[in-house]
């Protein structure tokens, strides 16, 4: 506040910096806290602030009192979530009172958003402070598109599970339609927590929850490339650069810029620099570390302690090595204005970015972008999200002091050619995937998820469709019904299904009608299906179409299938079983199946992709296809498919009612061979050629029972 009334300034930090350009371009409203505790100003001033924010900055202010800031922001967000998500579990202070306050403030934000948002709006919720908001908004605005982006790491399940409110937090985030993280590692951690805590599996990072598909993906945040890459051309920046050069003439410059935070690894960085000076006296008087620490969260005790630690280390280092004319560390406990910061980027030979954990780290990207001369080297922590994209940097373990010291030397001595080569390729990437691309990419994906969901809604088997279907069924004389087995009639992977099972009995009822031809179609071996459907008058297609049998017929081999390829593939599968605990090979006459249901899921996912590569390269000359189903990979002749087998059956007669029900992509062949007027029904929510969707095997059983009970 100044005498002339409130002053408005953009807030610092990665997120604010990043979204500013989107906010300027798009027809958008920004909902957030104004930065001033509501009880520190009069009601009139608060009204003026809110009005001006709305009129001049397209922003809606959510008032937060000092108590709320204390408990919500400093307490829950920065004293529980921040340390836990950055792998400092011992710093987290789990107080129920703080959780209550977190919920209340999220509700406050929900109310503020609901005042300005409609049910067809797009809402992008940012970061760990508002993890409950997506669910609160979805409840009230079920058709709005809600995206959530987490700017900090999502920790591994073993860490996340420590949170007493883990279920609520996940439920909150799952109110979104799209959940974004900086890296796929964080996305994986999130998916794994959802699986283990909420009990919901994902398919290719799509979660089916609450009758919706929620997409989870990685969107590595970019920077405003244009702004940083043209900074060096500004006279004010050049002036600053000149002044730095003249003050540090003859010195190589190492730069370190962070907010004050224990996750940034500042003390270890100073220790590593000190070690470097100890080991390399030839650099004394020739190098300066510019250490910029921007004050932040100064109310939290751990930050106060950190500041003391940093200052002690700086003074020890300067005290031990400094001379009258040389200060090894130039320390600044204040933020630098933009011009000065970018000028410092352009004058530094080395950027030291060694966080213990960092969601992304934009400083590293800004430094590269600002160096239009392609000079300079980065020492970058492998635990920063940015390391995934800036692979040309010198990557270090932030806890390894000798390694960081060695990396400082390597960076200082890197040849100009090498700097040039490394920096050019990083530049290209930063230019392509800049902040506009990032925001646009997220928005496009959000739009795509919402289209997908709409198509599901439009194709849900509603009561009206159901009664038309039953009407058509009743009116028909010759009916053909294909029913897939796993995931459709029974839950995927059910060990042994008894012929008395409700779904099987319903199939029996339908099959008993002489006007019906019911065909069970499955990837399972014929022995299994034979046992389950023992006395029922059903047709069976087994092994994805290798075998078939009419209702009172023997088994027939469908095509000229071969099995000589098995000799080659079997040893490969066995090798993968040995390397992957919990997996096994199942062999049937014409196929081999690698089953990884009991394996550790992340490991199985990696092995699966390796195995597919291995098999494809070795079996290129054999006409084989790889079929991926939930937890199994099946290898068989590619001439065999459910679609072909179903088509052959279809052509054996004239039908006036045809229905096919299936749950996974092997059933898609079957759906596509149907006529447009036939009924194709997909179990579960996923992209499909089917005309309609039902939720689960339970819903299939109900539908079949309804059809079977329909009077003639
Ligand atoms: C979170 C995540 C993630 C810093 N000091 C000064 C200054 N800055 C500006 C930088 C940069 C931003 O602040 C810092 O960005 P970071 O990425 O390092 O980190 P956080 O603020 O911790 O933000 C982080 C980020 O969100 C984005 O998703 O990368 O992992 O923790 O833009 O330029 N700017 C000026 N003077 C300073 O002294 N002018």
Image: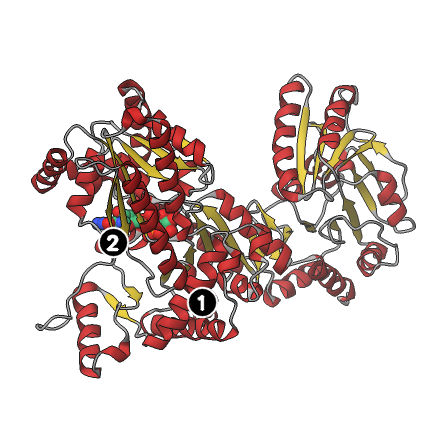
**Residue that appears at 10% across and 39% down:** 234
- Residue at the top extreme, as displayed: 621
Q: Is residue 241 left or right of residue 307?
A: left
Q: Is residue 342 left or right of residue 681?
A: left
- Callout 1 touching callout 2 (CB < 8 Å): no
Reply above or below: 162 against 588: below
**Residue that appears at 59% across and 58% down:** 161
Residue 489 appears at what percent x and percent y? 75, 54
Earlier in the chain: of badge 1 and badge 2, it is: 2
- Secondary structure category for the residue under label 1: helix
Q: Is residue 109 left or right of residue 604?
A: left
Locate residue 102: give its quadrant: bottom left
Say few, some or many: other residues with alpha carbon within 10 Å of mark 2 (under 14 / 14 to 19 / 20 or more).
some
Identify the residue under disc 2: 20
Identify the residue under disc 1: 76
Say few, some or many: other residues with alpha carbon within 10 Å of mark 1 (under 14 / 14 to 19 / 20 or more).
many
């Amino acid at each position: 506040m100044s005498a002339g009334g409130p002053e408005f300034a953009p807030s610092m930090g990665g997120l604010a910096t990043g979204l500013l350009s989107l906010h300027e371009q798009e027809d958008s409203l920004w909902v957030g806290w104004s930065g001033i505790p509501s009880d520190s100003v009069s009601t009139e001033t608060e009204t003026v602030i809110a009005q001006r924010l709305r009129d001049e900055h397209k922003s809606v202010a959510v008032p937060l009192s000092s108590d709320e800031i204390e408990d919500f922001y400093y307490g829950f967000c920065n004293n529980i979530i921040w340390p836990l998500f950055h792998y400092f579990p011992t710093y987290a202070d789990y107080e129920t009172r703080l959780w209550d306050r977190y919920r209340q403030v999220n509700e406050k934000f929900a109310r503020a958003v609901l005042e300005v948002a409609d049910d067809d709006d797009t809402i992008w919720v940012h970061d760990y402070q508002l993890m409950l908001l997506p669910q609160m908004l979805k409840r009230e605005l079920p058709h709005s598109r809600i995206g959530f982006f987490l700017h900090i790491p999502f920790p591994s399940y073993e860490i996340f599970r420590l949170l007493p409110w883990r279920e609520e937090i996940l439920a909150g985030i799952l109110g979104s339609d799209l959940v974004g993280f900086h890296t796929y590692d964080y996305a994986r951690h999130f998916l794994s927590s959802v699986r283990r805590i909420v009990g919901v599996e994902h398919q290719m990072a799509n979660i089916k929850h609450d009758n919706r598909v929620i997409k989870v993906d990685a969107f590595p945040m970019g920077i405003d490339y244009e702004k940083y890459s043209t900074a060096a051309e500004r006279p004010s920046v050049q002036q600053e650069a000149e002044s730095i050069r003249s003050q540090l003439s003859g010195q190589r410059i190492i730069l370190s810029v962070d907010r004050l935070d224990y996750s940034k690894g500042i003390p270890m960085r100073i220790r590593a620099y000190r070690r470097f000076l100890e080991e390399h006296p030839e650099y004394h008087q020739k190098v300066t570390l510019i250490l910029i620490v921007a004050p932040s969260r100064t109310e939290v005790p751990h930050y106060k302690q950190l500041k003391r630690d940093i200052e002690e280390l700086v003074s020890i280092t300067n005290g031990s090595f400094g001379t009258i004319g040389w200060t090894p560390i130039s320390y600044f406990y204040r933020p630098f204005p933009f011009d000065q910061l970018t000028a410092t980027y352009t004058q530094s030979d080395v950027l030291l970015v060694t966080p213990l954990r960092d969601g992304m780290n934009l400083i590293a990207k800004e430094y590269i972008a600002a160096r239009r001369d392609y000079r300079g080297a980065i020492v970058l922590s492998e635990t920063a999200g940015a390391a995934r994209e800036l692979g040309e940097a010198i990557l270090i373990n932030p806890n390894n002091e000798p390694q960081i010291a060695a990396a400082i030397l390597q960076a200082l001595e890197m040849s100009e050619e090498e700097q040039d080569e490394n920096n050019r390729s990083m530049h290209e990437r930063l230019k392509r995937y800049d902040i506009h691309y990032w925001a646009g990419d997220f928005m496009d994906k959000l739009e795509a998820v919402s289209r997908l969901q709409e198509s599901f809604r439009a194709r849900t088997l509603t009561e009206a469709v159901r009664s038309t279907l039953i009407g058509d069924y009743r009116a028909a004389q010759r009916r053909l019904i294909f029913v897939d087995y796993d995931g459709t009639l029974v839950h995927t992977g059910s060990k042994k299904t008894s012929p008395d099972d409700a779904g099987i009995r319903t199939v029996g009822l339908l099959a008993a009608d002489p006007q019906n031809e019911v065909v069970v179609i499955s990837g399972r071996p014929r022995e299994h299906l034979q046992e389950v459907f023992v006395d029922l008058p059903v047709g069976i297609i087994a092994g994805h179409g290798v075998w078939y049998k009419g209702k009172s017929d023997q088994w027939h081999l469908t095509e000229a299938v071969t099995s000589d390829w098995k000799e080659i593939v079997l040893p490969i599968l066995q090798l993968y079983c040995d390397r992957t605990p919990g997996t096994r090979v199942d062999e049937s006459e014409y196929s081999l199946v690698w089953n990884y249901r009991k394996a550790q899921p992340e490991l199985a996912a990696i092995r699966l992709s390796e195995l597919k590569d291995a098999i494809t390269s070795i079996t290129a000359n054999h006409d084989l296809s790889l079929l991926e189903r939930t937890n199994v990979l099946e290898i068989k002749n590619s001439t065999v498919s459910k679609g072909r087998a179903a088509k052959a059956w279809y052509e054996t007669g004239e039908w006036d009612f045809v229905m096919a029900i299936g749950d996974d992509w092997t059933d898609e062949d079957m759906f596509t061979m149907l006529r447009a007027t036939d009924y194709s029904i997909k179990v579960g929510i996923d992209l499909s050629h089917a005309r309609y969707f039902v939720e689960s095997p339970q819903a299939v059983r109900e539908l079949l029972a309804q059809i079977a009970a329909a009077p003639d």
